[in-house]
Image (cartoon, rainbow, N blue to C red):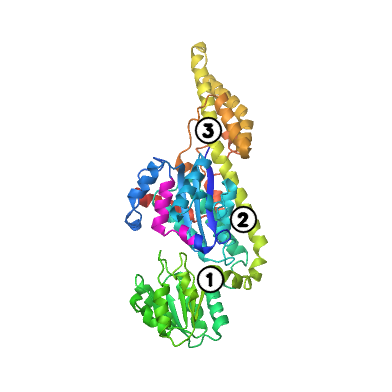
Amino acid sequence: MNELLALGVSHKTAPVALRERLAFSQSQALEFAAALLAPGAREPLGLGPEHAGAAEAPAERGREDGGAASEAVVLSTCNRTEIYQVTADPLRAEVHALGLLASRAGIRPTELAGAIYSPRNCDAARQLFRVTTGLESMVLGETEIQGQVRRAYEAALAAGLTGPLINRLFTAALTTGKLVRSQTEIGANRVSIASVAVDLASGTLGSLANRHVIILGAGETSELTAQALARQGAGTVFVANRHADRARSIAERFGGSVVSLERLPDQLVEADILVSSTSSPHHVLGAEELDLVMGQRNDRPLLLIDIAVPRDIDPRCGELDGVTLYDIDDLQEELAHNLSLRADEVPQAEAIIEKEIRRFARWLGQIDALPTVRALREHADAVVAQVLAENTGRWETASAGDRARTDAIARAVANRLLHEPTIRLRGLSGARRHSTLELVRELFALGADGEGVASESQLAAGADDEPDPVLASELPPGPGAEDEEAGELPLATVHSLQERRRR
């Protein structure tokens, strides 16, 4: 039986010095997820040109290494790195993933033990639901995380790394995020890392009017930072090489200007504040370089705020005379003062999450039982057909109508006998579910995995073939009613991306 396994670290369990060693770019996340898959789990991988940075060779090496997962997604943000896997061997999958993470961080797996959390099944789903709704964020209820979850999932989907369980998990998580934000005030009074960083700057330096601020990077956080600075009258200069056009667009909206990275030292001589938020895997500003700059500033202080993970600014910069350096972990204390209203919404948000977890748990139980129920019913149909065939020669005088009625009665008896077992098999939970399903397969000689197992596309949508009329009221509803009610629009994305990958 497949299980859902999550493995991760976050700002709640690990300092930024460790988180930055476990951070992934999107292409690296895809490569890592591919390395978790069991050999042949997804062949071919199908990383298209849109994932040019995801080297295929390392992904194939990961398969040869013998991962234990059949589906995988890696979510990496400033505050967390989380891996979601589907596996029939959770222990092996966890050990394999932990070993790869430790190797990436350059430490022994045992050194990660205190920082890693590894929930399974519904607890793993609950973790993702809480992450997507912003309950696990450093900024409670932040909206950016939902987009980050969506992008991580869609990239893995397009690369062929997901399957029915992961697809259902992430679409349900994204739906839950929408529900929480539409039915609670968890996102009220917009608070973001960027706004807190600007508040910290004003608290340290006083008025920001006419202050010279450098924003290093041109991503979403940089845009939010520019917006918050503009409200306080600060002048901004964007420093960007890779995304100069985007930086120029943001600068025009908020009255700033753009320079290349090569001119950063000159800008630092005049700056009062530097806010850095790039996706660079290495330090952009080193201590030696900054030491030379400080010698030209005539003892004027410089405030550095590093929001990036991995960090953009060498931590040793904070040891230089006249330099004050804050990283993303330093913002947590300031955040606590801004979130009292949102905290009041947490119980309601958690109630919505638990309702959606119960919905997901029902579906999870059904997909485990569905192959066995289907195989049992097919076995019964085969027995009925065999008995009828064996007795055909004894009914020489029976009319066609008599034969049809006999056939219907025989099938009705089989269906009535299977009615209660079907309900009970679908209602099983926990360890009892696995052991009972195995016992049923053994008693009826259905094979290790049963026969007539539903296809991946059927499981992904929670669908079944046309049910027998006797059992129609007891079988799980099709995807239409449940998904429409929850507004699971991401399912359309699943299908379109799967179609794009096939093309």
Image height check: is 256 above or below 106?
Answer: below
Q: Residues within 10 Å of mark 1 (few under 14, many from 20)?
A: many
Q: CA distance from mark 2 to mark 1?
A: 24 Å
Chain part drawn in magenta: 19-36
**Residue 190 picture quarter:** bottom right
Could you say whether the residue bearing mark 2 is in a helix, strand or loop? helix
Q: Could you tell me how far apart the alpha carbons at marks 3 and 1 are, in whole angstroms?
A: 51 Å
Residue denoted by label 3:
374
Pointer 2 with pointer 1, Cβ within 8 A? no
Q: Residues within 10 Å of mark 2 (few under 14, many from 20)?
A: many
Please name the residue that numbered disc 1 is placed on.
193
In the picture, the disc for residue 155 is none
Q: Label 1 amino acid? A: Ile
> Mark 2 against mark 3, which lies toward the viewer?
2
Residue in front for this viewpoint, 347 or 62:
62
| Residue located beneath label 2 in the image | 353
Lower sequence index among marks 2 and 1? 1
